[in-house]
Amino acid sequence: MGFFRAAPIAKHDDHGSVRNNLDKVSGMGDEQREHRAKKNIYAFLQRSSIEQRRSYLARGRRFVVLDVGQLSKSWITAVKNWLARKDRASEITMDDLTAELRLRGLEPPYDAVKRELATRFAGMDGTTQRKAGRKFAREIGMFIRESDKSLH
């Protein structure tokens, strides 16, 4: 996502302070970067959610027969299983249940697994957390590069 950033023009305010004006311009740049970063992360998560639903539909929408209560309970169990095992089968089940909920216009019951998620991530050492953060950042970077390519 290339962009041209012009150098700020230094102007003196009533007190002759160039620094105050430069700080204001710099702050606006930081806000714009933060806004752009949030937009990119949101777009990445949206695309991931769409891909998750697409994959679930391709596998045959196996959880369509469950009512909302069963679906929510199954999702909670799937998340706990995934946290315990961290294997691909548990992840697919969790993703499929998430997709089914979202296809029905519902959000997964995150509050029901908040404690387990917090415990799991609190138990991660700093190195593991940084690795996970870098992996997520790389995935977002690849998404942004792919998006930029499709614009040209």
Image: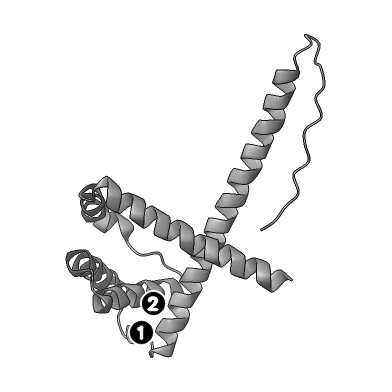
The quarter holding residue 152 reads: bottom right
Give the total of numbered labels: 2
What's the residue at 42%, 67% (across, down)? 106
Image side of residue 98 versus residue 123, left or right: right
Image side of residue 92 versus residue 37, left or right: left
What's the residue at 36%, 71% (across, down)? 98
The quarter holding residue 5 reads: top right
Residue type beneath disc 2:
Glu
Residue type beneath disc 1:
Val
Q: Which residue is mark 1?
A: 64
Above or below — where is 108 with respect to 131?
below
Image side of residue 6 versus residue 43, left or right: right
Query: Which is nearer the eye, 102 or 136?
Result: 136
What's the residue at 32%, 83% (across, down)? 63
Q: Residue 120 at x, y = what percent?
A: 22, 54
What's the residue at 63%, 39% (across, down)? 31
Q: Which residue is mark 2?
A: 100
- In three-dimensional space, the C-alpha distance between marks 1 and 2, rounded to whole angstroms, equals 7 Å
Query: Which is nearer the eye, 112 or 8?
Result: 8
Element type at marker 2?
Answer: helix
Element type at marker 1?
Answer: loop
Q: Residue 24 at x, y = what percent?
A: 70, 27
Query: Which is nearer the eye, 58 or 1?
Result: 1
The answer to whether the residue labelled 1 contacts the one labelled 2, judged by CB atoms less than 8 Å apart, is: yes
